[in-house]
Image (cartoon, rainbow, N blue to C red):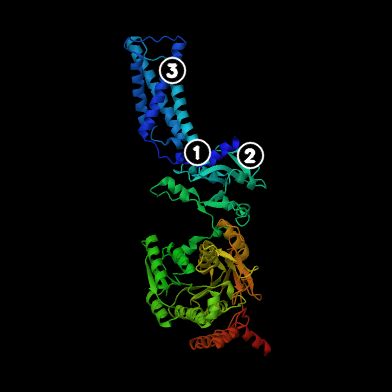
Amino acid sequence: MGQKFDLIRKSDIFSHLSSLKYVSRWVVLLLDTLLCVFAFFLAIFFTERYSIQIPEFPSFGIAYRLLLLLFLQICFFWIFHTYSGVLRYSSFVDVSKVTFAVGATSLFAWFINIIVFTSTGRFVYSNLGLILYFLFAFFFLFSLRFVVKTAFGYLNLYSGNATRVMIYGTKSAGIAIAKMLRTIENDTYRVVGFIDDKDSVVNRLILGLKVYPKDEHLIPLMRKLRVNKVIVSALKMQSINTSTDLDIFIDNNINVLYAPSITDWDNNSPHPNQSIASQIKNIRIEDLLERSPIKLNLDPLRQQIKGAVVLVTGAAGSIGSEIARQVAKNEPHLLVLLDQAESPLHDFRLEISNTYPTLNFIPCIADIRSRERVEEVISMYKPDIIYHAAAYKHVPLMEEHPCESIHANVMGTKNVADMAIKYGVKRFVMVSTDKAVNPTNIMGASKRIAEIYVQSLFKKAVQTNPDCTKFITTRFGNVLGSNGSVIPYFRKQIEQGGPVTVTHPDIIRYFMTIPEACMLVLEAGLMGNGGEIFVFDMGHPVKILDLAKKMIRLSGYTPGTDIKIVFTGLRPGEKLYEELLNKKELTIPTDNPSIMVAKVREFDFDKVSVQIDKLIKMADLGKTFLAVSTMKEIVPEFKSNNSPFEELDIKEEGK
């Protein structure tokens, strides 16, 4: 019998009931009025049963007393708007309104009693009758709301319309989410319990829901309760290790949802209740890889940028655009957005116009490989600060096109740096990469040569002009979600049903969020005195295979079964392990524990300049192997890996 009931309960026989539209407020008012009529007659019945005589006028019959009381009751229903609430979502506020409306009616009827008795010596209502009416009316009105709310809650809980979820965490944020979810129009989510790690709250009740421990029994229990989603609040995310503490859910195909702080919820939707559900999103791999937020002192940065002319190269790219956004927040006098990509720059122009309508900015189509165009822009706008983020960054492509890498990353940087000196730019902040350390590919070597050029240029310029441009270099690893990075690539492969391609089972990478990386770039540019190479604390490296598996599970699939993982082999120039510092280099701390200064080998500008001019000439002529050979002369630690250019290293060793 129990099994049959369970089958009926899980079927969709009654599921349509939970999606019924709300009844009219006039229907609610009518139901409340009928219940009050019943309460009145019940009160009369008990007063007469106990032979309580009511002195009254002959004309004060039951009908008269009923009509008078109903008139008063409907007036107070209107005053307190008891009928405007939705019965299925009744709350403490609705119960309070009912209490005040019924209480005010009884109290007002008692005043009428006093007035009539004073003038005639007779009562309209007995005092006991009014007390009984208040109690019965409140009970019936409360019961109506309780029964409707409970019935719809049960229907939603066991129909196909509700997604059964648990909330991880019992602090204020988790409880607030549970309360808010109870107001959702279509009951998108139905909270059936809480999960917590603390023994002090486990097995207790919160909002009538049990708190379950996060132990070995949790997953079987969730299966039994048919719960396959867990909601984690923003506050809880800050107090746990996101890389490991959520694995119990992810590894068991429990969908993890993320709810931002309620103060950050967008309540501008034309359908507010639906908007509540829309705030809760599937947790992303980026959320699991994020570290504790880096706290920066933004006041000095604002002082540096406010009122200044700032030029950002590569402004339409992942890093350049975020640098531009953060600069825009600090009220520069003019923000120049330079990029050679027309469509992305146009899109970014529209974004900046909408987000910062009062900002004075200029989008500028220009290619840093054109020395004349770079000089034209810098001479026209005379920037105080340049953030140089323009570069070619994809390792396999640059391995196939070394001359283009040299043109963009070396010659382009040289053009911008030379014009910064010529036109008195105060600060030049270059975005570099961890691939510049002991480079094994063309891209990393080209960025290392760019580092060498700006560092040696500053060393020479400062000898004759102490107030010359301060050249500052920043190095960091992979950024989450940047254009062409591994996470969007994996996500696309998963959406297509796989397979997910990983180059090597042991490959690891460092990751940092784009806003975090760009804020550190800005602060490094602030603290630099010229000639430094700043290295960022990238945290702990992430194994790419583990990253792929976790992304597959987050998408609701099983790695190796639903989505295959295929190993394709290291790409040309690719390392297994990225390094942030050359082995011969040391670091010294700064005031910000997330930023260190690398003590690197210094180069003589006159010698380096000749070598770089030779390198650019080889690239101009398309002499690929001669160009790469010159790169290896400038950067002796550059050893090609899994690349056709390995033969140049063999020849060098054979000399």
The answer to whether residue 404 is left or right of residue 335 is right
The image quadrant where one finds the C terminus is: bottom right
Q: Position of residue 470 (x, y in %)?
A: 50, 74
Extreme residue in the bottom direction:
655
Q: Amino acid at mark 3?
A: Ala
Callout 1 touching callout 3 (CB < 8 Å): no
Q: Vertical placement of 161 versus 501: above or below?
A: above
* Amino acid carrying mark 1 in the image: Leu
Q: Residues within 10 Å of mark 2 (few under 14, many from 20)?
A: some
Q: Is residue 436 above or below residue 34?
A: below
Q: Quadrant of the N terminus?
A: top right
Give the distance between the C-alpha atoms of the residues marked 1 and 2, in whole angstroms. 25 Å
Question: Viewer-proximal residue, 555 or 119?
Answer: 555
Can you give x and y, in whole percent of width and height, for residue 20 in the image?
A: 42, 40
- Residue indicated by mark 3: 43
- In the displayed structure, would residue 348 be above or below residue 209? below
First of labels 2, 3 by sequence position: 3
Checking the image for residue 155, the label placed there is 1
Label at residue 203: 2
Q: Earlier in the sequence, mark 1 or mark 2?
A: 1
**Front position in the image: 455 or 487:** 487
Q: CA distance from mark 1 to mark 3?
A: 34 Å
Seen in the image, is 305 located left or right of residue 219?
left
Could you say whether the residue bearing mark 2 is in a helix, strand or loop? loop
Up/down of 102 relative to 188, above or below:
above
**Does the CB distance between marks 2 and 3 fall below 8 Å?**
no
Residue depicted at 57% across the width and 37% down the height: 4
